Amino acid sequence: MRLLQNTFVGLWLASSVFAQLPGNGDPSLEVADWPPGPGSLLVPQQPDAELTAMMSQVDPARVQAIITKLVSFGTRNTMSSQTDPNRGIGAARDWIAAQMRTFAATSEGRMTVDTPSYIQAAKGSILFPTNISNVVATLKGSIDPTRIYVVSGHYDSRNSNVSDFTNDAPGANDDGSGVAVAMELARVMATHKPGATIMFAAVAGEEQSLFGSAFMASTLASDGANVEGMLNNDIVGSSTGDDGTKDPFTIRMFAQGIPPTETLAQIQSRVSIGAENDSPIRQLGRFVVEVASNPVTQMNVQMEYRPDRYLRGGDHESFLAHGYPAVRFTEPRENFAHQHQNVRVQNGVQFGDLVEFCDFDFNARVARVNGVALWSLAQAPGTPRGLTLDTSMLTNNSTLKWTPDPLAASYEVVWRASEDTMWTHVIPVGNVSSATILLSKDNVQFGVRAVGANGFKSPAAFQAF
């Protein structure tokens, strides 16, 4: 009889605990009960009052004006005129730089604007030596200026023939929309003081072979710059697909798994601990999803987890090539009749990358996604360094150690079941440089993130190997 009673009590207690789990009764919200472990469910950090106010200033009408002006230059092909004041890539470059300087004028000296350039020799679809110029507005960090975050779009355009530098190539969505993101955020943030440095870039030569972004990334790498995140915006201006389906509140984010700079030995070590999904690139992507999917942006950030060979190329690749974490944003439903096409009507279908096919409210929401992510990165301490997981002892506990950061007020250990894509649990551990968690390293993945005195949290670090 006592055995039956004990069994009943045990079942009742288990059912009571289950009944208190968040989401019980709704399978889409329920929390997995394996593995059990310490801490609480991770609640995404929300934009503070300053950031919310900034994002309310992102203006769809200004996004529209930027894209319309860029289209007015006729073509922005990389090989088009550098000197004509009204047509060609040179006129576009000069207008972007002039606009950026008006933003910088409001910054009390914190923002500077440069147009670094070099001569690209004839190569591939570049038919003759060509000046490649970027426009970069740099908002210097007030606390940790050597830590850098980059947001970019490419201001060059193309039509059906990537080497056609004379005929029209409007480039409204590809990639006037990405340039509008960088420019509008530069305008909004110029009067504020980020903790770390933010660079707002419009780069050239993307359509031929990522020349402008490669020049920018290699320059930063040569200078030993600490770039902890790069957000590339390429084709982010329309919410309507080729079948007419609209998806105005979703943005895709491509985040590569295994970094291209890793050696074979490093890749083998990564695979040996099941860390294919835990590169610094994926940690940046997780951070963006967490901080930028909320009512302030009105967007759902959808991180793509497909195999690396299928991931969309673009200017983020130039930063990945130098070991910098970088991701690409692209609209969820594309219409290829409006990309890389000569302007024409064929069988009753309008081809060409025209302004009329852009959704400026959607484009502004994408800008807010970038803005929330950038500001949250810049206001937080940097990603913890030197994280190790002690595997020297046979134990069901897990000991993590990392290098302390003077800018961190405290740290949090985050964890998730190995099959989960996002961090699900968080354990505050205080201002320490090591922590032992009562949870087996065989069952979960661990990360550590730094928390600033202002409450902003860094992306999670994953163990070094």
Image (cartoon, grey):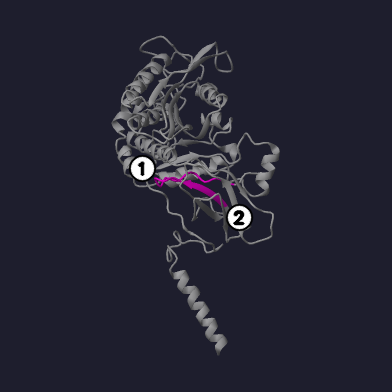
Q: Residue furthest top?
A: 83
Q: What residue would you read off at disc 2? A: 399
Q: Nearer the viewer, residue 137 or 406?
A: 406
Residue 385 lies in quadrant: top right
From the top left corner, tell me how far across and down residue 241 is, in percent: 42, 37
Q: Which residue lies most toward the bottom here?
A: 1
Where is residue 25, by image quadrant?
Answer: bottom left
Residue 416 at x, y percent in the picture: 54, 55
Q: Measured along the vertical axis of the image, is residue 389 above or below residue 189?
A: below
Q: Amino acid at mark 2?
A: Thr
Is label 2 in a helix, a strand or a loop? Answer: strand
Q: Nearer the viewer, residue 375 or 196?
A: 196
* Residue that appears at 61% across and 40% down: 258
- Residue 341 locus on image (x, y percent): 45, 24
Relative side of 67 to 132, left or right? left
Q: Image point 51% across, 29% down: which residue? A: 315
Report whether residue 349 is seen.
Answer: no
Report if residue 319 is visible in the image.
Answer: yes
Task: Point out the image quarter for the N terminus.
Answer: bottom right
Residue 205 - label: none
Q: Earlier in the sequence, mark 1 or mark 2?
A: 1
Secondary structure, magenta segment, majority class:
loop
Please give the range of residues in magenta: 446-462
Is residue 454 part of the magenta span, yes or no? Answer: yes
Residue drawn 35% across the image and 21% down it: 101
Residue underneath mark 1: 297
Q: Secondary structure at mark 1?
A: loop
How far across and how far down the image is residue 404, in percent?
54, 44
